[in-house]
Image: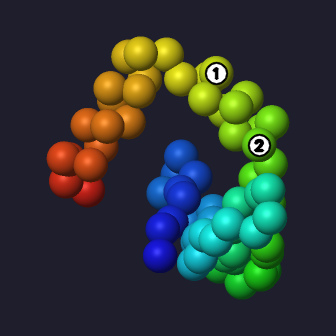
Amino acid sequence: MMKLYNPDGTVLMTITGVKPTGRCLMIEGSLFGGMPITTQLRPAEARAGLKLLSFGKLLFLISLFCRRSP
């Protein structure tokens, strides 16, 4: 389970599952602690997301795996 937070520290989304389906990646979870949601990440959107990452942002993302949560 993975959680995404608002800047004020409240939980925005809880991701409970990720699975490949056909040509997409299905993401299951809940919004704001209760509203169930199933979304799909399409190939074009995944490529667009990678374009947002610079080399420095990619290094920061990798370093997150070695950091402790506050």
Image depth: mark 2 or mark 1 in front: 2
Residue under the point 53% across and 57% down? 5
Q: Between 4 and 6, which is closer to the camera in this rendering?
A: 4
Q: Which residue is mark 2?
A: 43
Left or right: 56 in relation to 34: left
The amino acid beneath tag 1 is Lys
Sequence-wise, the earlier of marks 2 and 1 is 2
Left or right: 21 in relation to 10: right
Residue under the point 20% across and 47% down? 67
Quadrant hosting residue 46? top right
Q: Position of residue 31 (x, y in %)?
A: 72, 71
Q: Is residue 1 visible?
A: yes
Q: Secondary structure at mark 2?
A: helix
Residue under the point 61% across and 70% down? 18
Q: Is disc 2 in contact with disc 1, using a CB cutoff of under 8 Å? A: no
The amino acid beneath tag 2 is Pro
Q: Quadrant of the C terminus?
A: bottom left
Mark 1 nearby-residue class (10 Å; few <14, some 14–19, many ≥20)? few
Q: Which residue is mark 1?
A: 51
Q: Position of residue 57 (x, y in %)?
A: 43, 23
